[in-house]
Amino acid sequence: MTTLYTNETPTAVKEAKGLHLITEQTPNGKKVQILLEELKDVYGTSWTTSLLNLDAPNPEQNKDWFLRLNPNARIPILIDNTQTPPFVVMESLAELLYLQETVDKDNVFGFDNKVEQSEAVQWLFFWAAGQPMQSQNNYFSRTEQNPVAISRFSAKTLEMYGVLELRLSGRYTAGPRDFLAGDGKGKYSIADIGAWPWLRAWKRTRISDEEMASFPHLLGWIARVAARPAVERGISKFYDSEENPELLVSTEK
Protein backbone atom coordinates (compact mmCIF):
# COMPACT_ATOMS: atom_id res chain seq x y z
CA MET A 1 0.00 0.00 0.00
CA THR A 2 1.39 3.40 -1.01
CA THR A 3 1.90 5.71 1.93
CA LEU A 4 0.59 9.24 1.70
CA TYR A 5 3.59 10.86 3.33
CA THR A 6 7.30 10.10 2.98
CA ASN A 7 10.49 11.38 4.55
CA GLU A 8 10.56 14.05 1.84
CA THR A 9 7.13 15.42 2.74
CA PRO A 10 7.51 18.79 4.48
CA THR A 11 6.91 18.57 8.23
CA ALA A 12 4.19 21.21 8.12
CA VAL A 13 2.22 18.95 5.79
CA LYS A 14 2.73 15.50 7.26
CA GLU A 15 2.30 16.60 10.87
CA ALA A 16 -0.80 18.72 10.24
CA LYS A 17 -3.96 17.94 12.16
CA GLY A 18 -7.51 18.40 10.98
CA LEU A 19 -7.98 20.19 7.67
CA HIS A 20 -4.80 21.26 5.89
CA LEU A 21 -4.73 23.40 2.77
CA ILE A 22 -1.81 23.56 0.34
CA THR A 23 -2.35 26.63 -1.79
CA GLU A 24 -1.06 29.86 -3.32
CA GLN A 25 -2.59 33.10 -4.57
CA THR A 26 -4.07 31.80 -7.81
CA PRO A 27 -7.74 32.03 -8.79
CA ASN A 28 -8.18 28.33 -8.10
CA GLY A 29 -6.50 28.58 -4.71
CA LYS A 30 -8.68 31.54 -3.81
CA LYS A 31 -11.86 29.52 -4.27
CA VAL A 32 -11.01 27.18 -1.41
CA GLN A 33 -9.43 29.91 0.68
CA ILE A 34 -12.66 31.91 0.47
CA LEU A 35 -14.92 29.00 1.42
CA LEU A 36 -12.75 28.11 4.40
CA GLU A 37 -12.89 31.73 5.57
CA GLU A 38 -16.67 31.71 5.15
CA LEU A 39 -16.96 28.46 7.14
CA LYS A 40 -14.81 30.01 9.85
CA ASP A 41 -17.29 32.87 10.21
CA VAL A 42 -20.29 30.54 10.45
CA TYR A 43 -18.97 27.49 12.29
CA GLY A 44 -15.60 28.51 13.70
CA THR A 45 -13.91 26.08 11.30
CA SER A 46 -10.16 25.85 11.72
CA TRP A 47 -7.46 24.61 9.39
CA THR A 48 -3.76 24.98 8.75
CA THR A 49 -2.16 26.27 5.59
CA SER A 50 1.00 25.60 3.59
CA LEU A 51 2.03 27.79 0.67
CA LEU A 52 4.06 26.89 -2.42
CA ASN A 53 6.24 29.03 -4.64
CA LEU A 54 4.85 27.89 -7.97
CA ASP A 55 7.57 29.70 -9.91
CA ALA A 56 10.56 28.21 -8.08
CA PRO A 57 13.33 26.78 -10.33
CA ASN A 58 12.59 23.29 -8.99
CA PRO A 59 8.92 23.62 -8.00
CA GLU A 60 7.58 21.49 -5.18
CA GLN A 61 4.44 20.53 -7.10
CA ASN A 62 6.57 18.44 -9.48
CA LYS A 63 8.24 16.43 -6.72
CA ASP A 64 7.38 12.96 -5.55
CA TRP A 65 5.98 14.04 -2.18
CA PHE A 66 3.48 16.33 -3.88
CA LEU A 67 2.57 13.94 -6.70
CA ARG A 68 1.57 11.38 -4.06
CA LEU A 69 -1.05 13.88 -2.95
CA ASN A 70 -2.06 15.09 -6.40
CA PRO A 71 -0.68 13.35 -9.50
CA ASN A 72 -1.91 16.32 -11.54
CA ALA A 73 0.72 18.54 -9.87
CA ARG A 74 -1.66 21.42 -9.20
CA ILE A 75 -2.75 23.46 -6.22
CA PRO A 76 -4.87 23.74 -4.20
CA ILE A 77 -4.90 20.47 -2.30
CA LEU A 78 -7.15 19.89 0.70
CA ILE A 79 -6.10 17.17 3.15
CA ASP A 80 -8.63 15.96 5.70
CA ASN A 81 -6.57 14.48 8.51
CA THR A 82 -9.68 13.66 10.52
CA GLN A 83 -10.09 10.66 8.20
CA THR A 84 -8.08 7.46 8.64
CA PRO A 85 -6.01 7.36 6.56
CA PRO A 86 -5.97 11.08 5.73
CA PHE A 87 -8.16 11.87 2.74
CA VAL A 88 -6.82 14.09 -0.05
CA VAL A 89 -9.11 16.16 -2.25
CA MET A 90 -7.69 17.59 -5.47
CA GLU A 91 -9.35 19.99 -7.92
CA SER A 92 -10.69 23.23 -6.45
CA LEU A 93 -14.35 22.71 -7.34
CA ALA A 94 -14.28 19.20 -5.87
CA GLU A 95 -12.80 20.73 -2.72
CA LEU A 96 -15.67 23.21 -2.53
CA LEU A 97 -18.16 20.35 -2.78
CA TYR A 98 -16.29 18.30 -0.17
CA LEU A 99 -16.22 21.15 2.33
CA GLN A 100 -19.83 22.04 1.71
CA GLU A 101 -20.92 18.44 2.22
CA THR A 102 -18.75 17.65 5.25
CA VAL A 103 -18.40 20.94 7.13
CA ASP A 104 -21.40 23.04 6.10
CA LYS A 105 -23.94 21.06 8.13
CA ASP A 106 -26.62 23.74 7.87
CA ASN A 107 -26.18 24.21 4.12
CA VAL A 108 -25.36 27.88 4.52
CA PHE A 109 -23.35 27.71 1.30
CA GLY A 110 -25.45 24.97 -0.26
CA PHE A 111 -29.11 24.07 -0.32
CA ASP A 112 -31.42 21.76 1.62
CA ASN A 113 -33.57 21.44 -1.47
CA LYS A 114 -32.08 18.91 -3.89
CA VAL A 115 -33.26 20.84 -6.94
CA GLU A 116 -31.57 24.03 -5.75
CA GLN A 117 -28.44 22.06 -4.84
CA SER A 118 -28.43 20.56 -8.32
CA GLU A 119 -28.66 24.09 -9.69
CA ALA A 120 -25.54 25.07 -7.73
CA VAL A 121 -23.67 22.03 -9.03
CA GLN A 122 -24.75 22.82 -12.60
CA TRP A 123 -23.19 26.28 -12.35
CA LEU A 124 -20.03 24.78 -10.88
CA PHE A 125 -19.85 22.45 -13.87
CA PHE A 126 -20.54 25.33 -16.26
CA TRP A 127 -17.59 27.17 -14.80
CA ALA A 128 -15.37 24.08 -14.91
CA ALA A 129 -16.01 23.94 -18.65
CA GLY A 130 -15.70 27.68 -19.23
CA GLN A 131 -12.78 28.56 -17.00
CA PRO A 132 -10.11 27.31 -19.45
CA MET A 133 -11.40 29.84 -21.99
CA GLN A 134 -10.48 32.74 -19.73
CA SER A 135 -7.26 31.06 -18.66
CA GLN A 136 -6.15 30.68 -22.28
CA ASN A 137 -7.30 34.21 -23.03
CA ASN A 138 -5.13 35.50 -20.19
CA TYR A 139 -2.12 33.55 -21.44
CA PHE A 140 -2.28 34.51 -25.10
CA SER A 141 -3.14 38.12 -24.28
CA ARG A 142 0.08 38.37 -22.28
CA THR A 143 2.30 36.78 -24.91
CA GLU A 144 0.71 38.64 -27.85
CA GLN A 145 2.24 36.12 -30.25
CA ASN A 146 -0.82 34.39 -31.65
CA PRO A 147 -3.55 36.69 -32.98
CA VAL A 148 -5.80 33.78 -33.94
CA ALA A 149 -5.69 32.33 -30.43
CA ILE A 150 -6.23 35.76 -28.87
CA SER A 151 -9.27 36.34 -31.07
CA ARG A 152 -10.73 32.91 -30.40
CA PHE A 153 -10.31 32.85 -26.63
CA SER A 154 -11.38 36.47 -26.22
CA ALA A 155 -14.59 35.68 -28.08
CA LYS A 156 -15.15 32.52 -26.02
CA THR A 157 -14.58 34.46 -22.78
CA LEU A 158 -17.12 37.09 -23.82
CA GLU A 159 -19.54 34.32 -24.75
CA MET A 160 -19.15 32.80 -21.29
CA TYR A 161 -19.67 36.19 -19.64
CA GLY A 162 -22.81 36.56 -21.72
CA VAL A 163 -24.23 33.35 -20.29
CA LEU A 164 -23.61 34.60 -16.75
CA GLU A 165 -25.14 37.99 -17.60
CA LEU A 166 -28.21 36.23 -18.98
CA ARG A 167 -28.55 34.23 -15.78
CA LEU A 168 -28.07 37.16 -13.42
CA SER A 169 -30.28 39.51 -15.42
CA GLY A 170 -33.23 37.18 -14.85
CA ARG A 171 -34.39 37.70 -18.42
CA TYR A 172 -36.03 34.29 -18.51
CA THR A 173 -36.91 33.99 -14.83
CA ALA A 174 -38.76 36.06 -12.24
CA GLY A 175 -36.37 39.03 -12.39
CA PRO A 176 -32.77 40.04 -11.70
CA ARG A 177 -30.78 37.75 -9.46
CA ASP A 178 -28.23 38.49 -6.77
CA PHE A 179 -26.53 35.09 -7.04
CA LEU A 180 -26.23 32.19 -9.48
CA ALA A 181 -28.17 29.42 -7.73
CA GLY A 182 -31.32 29.16 -5.65
CA ASP A 183 -34.92 30.28 -5.90
CA GLY A 184 -35.93 33.88 -6.40
CA LYS A 185 -32.93 36.20 -6.37
CA GLY A 186 -30.73 33.26 -5.44
CA LYS A 187 -28.47 32.66 -2.46
CA TYR A 188 -24.73 33.10 -2.09
CA SER A 189 -23.29 29.62 -2.40
CA ILE A 190 -20.43 27.50 -3.66
CA ALA A 191 -21.69 28.25 -7.18
CA ASP A 192 -20.63 31.87 -6.74
CA ILE A 193 -17.42 31.06 -4.87
CA GLY A 194 -16.37 28.67 -7.63
CA ALA A 195 -16.52 31.30 -10.35
CA TRP A 196 -15.80 34.63 -8.68
CA PRO A 197 -11.97 34.50 -8.28
CA TRP A 198 -11.56 34.21 -12.05
CA LEU A 199 -14.27 36.68 -12.99
CA ARG A 200 -12.96 39.37 -10.64
CA ALA A 201 -9.76 39.33 -12.72
CA TRP A 202 -11.43 40.17 -16.02
CA LYS A 203 -9.15 43.19 -16.49
CA ARG A 204 -6.25 40.80 -17.03
CA THR A 205 -7.87 39.75 -20.29
CA ARG A 206 -8.14 41.79 -23.47
CA ILE A 207 -11.73 42.61 -22.62
CA SER A 208 -12.20 46.38 -22.63
CA ASP A 209 -14.20 48.50 -20.21
CA GLU A 210 -16.63 49.17 -23.04
CA GLU A 211 -17.15 45.47 -23.70
CA MET A 212 -17.57 44.75 -20.01
CA ALA A 213 -20.22 47.48 -19.76
CA SER A 214 -22.45 45.10 -21.73
CA PHE A 215 -22.60 42.90 -18.61
CA PRO A 216 -24.00 45.18 -15.88
CA HIS A 217 -25.55 42.39 -13.84
CA LEU A 218 -22.30 40.43 -13.91
CA LEU A 219 -20.36 43.49 -12.77
CA GLY A 220 -22.86 44.00 -9.96
CA TRP A 221 -22.44 40.39 -8.90
CA ILE A 222 -18.63 40.70 -8.91
CA ALA A 223 -18.88 43.74 -6.61
CA ARG A 224 -21.50 42.08 -4.39
CA VAL A 225 -19.34 39.03 -3.71
CA ALA A 226 -16.21 41.16 -3.26
CA ALA A 227 -17.82 43.07 -0.39
CA ARG A 228 -18.04 40.01 1.85
CA PRO A 229 -15.49 40.08 4.73
CA ALA A 230 -14.60 36.39 4.30
CA VAL A 231 -13.92 36.98 0.61
CA GLU A 232 -11.60 39.85 1.47
CA ARG A 233 -9.68 37.57 3.83
CA GLY A 234 -9.68 34.70 1.36
CA ILE A 235 -7.79 36.73 -1.23
CA SER A 236 -5.57 38.54 1.26
CA LYS A 237 -1.77 38.56 1.40
CA PHE A 238 -1.93 35.88 4.10
CA TYR A 239 -2.10 33.34 1.26
CA ASP A 240 0.79 34.85 -0.72
CA SER A 241 4.09 33.03 -0.20
CA GLU A 242 6.08 36.19 -0.91
CA GLU A 243 4.17 38.13 1.72
CA ASN A 244 3.87 35.30 4.24
CA PRO A 245 7.08 33.25 3.81
CA GLU A 246 6.72 31.50 7.18
CA LEU A 247 4.00 29.35 5.61
CA LEU A 248 6.14 28.49 2.59
CA VAL A 249 7.08 24.81 2.37
CA SER A 250 10.16 23.70 0.46
CA THR A 251 12.36 20.63 0.35
CA GLU A 252 15.23 22.56 -1.16
CA LYS A 253 18.36 22.64 0.97
Image (cartoon, rainbow, N blue to C red):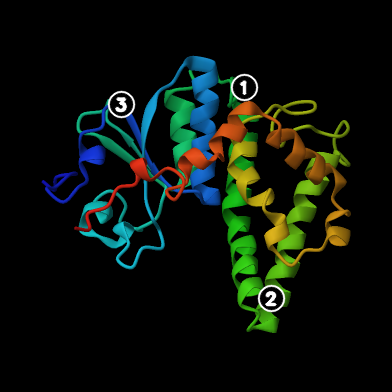
Residue under label 3: 18
Instruction: Work out how far the residue at label 1 is from the one at label 2, CA to CA, in angstroms.
Output: 41 Å
Q: Is residue 204 left or right of residue 158?
A: left
Residue under label 1: 113
| Disc 3 residue crowd, few under 14, some 14–19, many 20+, Cα 10 Å | some
Q: Nearer the viewer, residue 183 or 243?
A: 243
**Among numbered discs 1 and 3, the one appearing first in the sequence:** 3
Residue 95 location, quadrant: top left
Instruction: Work out how far the residue at label 1 is from the one at label 3, CA to CA, in angstroms.
Output: 29 Å
| Residue in the image at 69% along x and 76% along y | 150
At mark 2, the secondary structure is: helix
Q: Which residue type carries mark 1? A: Asn
- Residue 52 visible to the viewer: yes
- Compared to residue 153, the image places residue 251 above or below, namely above
Residue under label 2: 150
- Residue 208, position in %: x, y? 82, 63
Q: Is residue 11 left or right of residue 154?
A: left
- Residue 116, position in %: x, y? 65, 28
Q: In this view, does 192 lie to the left or right of 128?
A: right
| Residue in the image at 84% along x and 42% along y | 217
**Among numbered discs 3 and 2, the one appearing first in the sequence:** 3
At mark 3, the secondary structure is: loop
| Residue in the image at 76% along x and 38% along y | 223
Q: Which residue type carries mark 2? A: Ile
Residue 78 location, quadrant: top left
**Among numbered discs 1 and 2, the one appearing first in the sequence:** 1
| Residue in the image at 54% along x and 41% along y | 31
Q: Nearer the viewer, residue 178 or 1?
A: 178
